[in-house]
Image (spheres, helix red, strand yellow):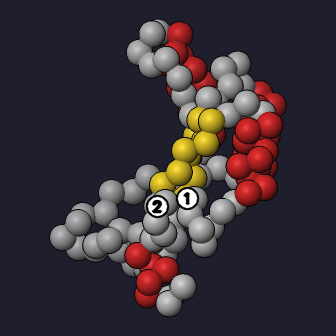
């Protein structure tokens, strides 16, 4: 990840100071294993995921030792994500919602 000074560019968004998108190598499973270690060490009781679609959830479930207990996603009348919620429930995950009244951008889009 690249540091972007807040006084040079705000919000930092997905680009660097030259306006280019910078791809960062990320090993999601290494991150998940580190979170599993936190459970083993007694530092946390449960671990979950946020903004994952069905494919990423399947990827985690295929290799994890400790299953995610919760999926947090944007849910409201304009974005019900019923297929994703059903899948998460089917694999035993709790679903929590954010932006339950809709995001401010929906007002800007007259939705």
Q: Decide if residue 108 is in sight here.
A: yes
Label 2 Cα neighbours within 10 Å, binned few <14 / some 14-19 / many ≥20: few
Quadrant of residue 87 within the rendered picture: top right
Residue 20 or residue 107, whichever sits in front: 107
Quick check: 5 left or right of 60? left
Q: Is residue 83 above or below residue 62?
A: below
Q: Looking at the image, is 30 positioned above or below residue 101?
A: above
- Residue 8 placement (x, y as % from top left): 23, 73
| Residue 32 visible (yes or no) | no
How many numbered tags mark residues here? Answer: 2
Q: Say what secondary structure mark 2 lies in.
A: loop
Which residue bears the numbered disc 2? Answer: 99
Q: Which image quadrant for residue 59?
A: top right
User: Residue at left 46%, top 61%?
Assistant: 99
Q: Residues within 10 Å of mark 1 (few under 14, many from 20)?
A: some
* Position in image of residue 86 (x %, y %): 77, 47
Residue for point 73% across, 41% down: 88
How far apart in space, not on screen, are marks 2 and 1 (Cα)?
Answer: 6 Å
Q: Which residue is mark 1?
A: 74
List x then y, in percent, for residue 36. 57, 20
Upstream in the sequence, badge 2 or badge 1? 1
Whether tag 2 and tag 1 are in contact, CB under 8 A, the answer is yes
Rendered residue at 60%/24% (across/down)? 33
């Amino acid at each position: 990840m690249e540091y972007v000074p807040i006084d040079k560019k705000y919000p930092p968004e997905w680009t660097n100071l030259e306006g280019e998108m910078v791809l960062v190598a990320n090993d999601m499973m290494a991150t998940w294993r580190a979170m599993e270690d936190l459970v083993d060490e007694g530092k946390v009781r449960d671990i979950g995921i946020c903004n994952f679609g069905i494919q990423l959830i399947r990827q985690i479930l295929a290799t994890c030792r400790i299953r995610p207990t919760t999926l947090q996603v944007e849910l409201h009348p304009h974005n019900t994500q019923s297929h994703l919620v059903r899948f998460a429930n089917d694999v035993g995950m709790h679903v929590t919602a954010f932006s339950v009244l809709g995001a401010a951008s929906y007002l800007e889009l007259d939705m």
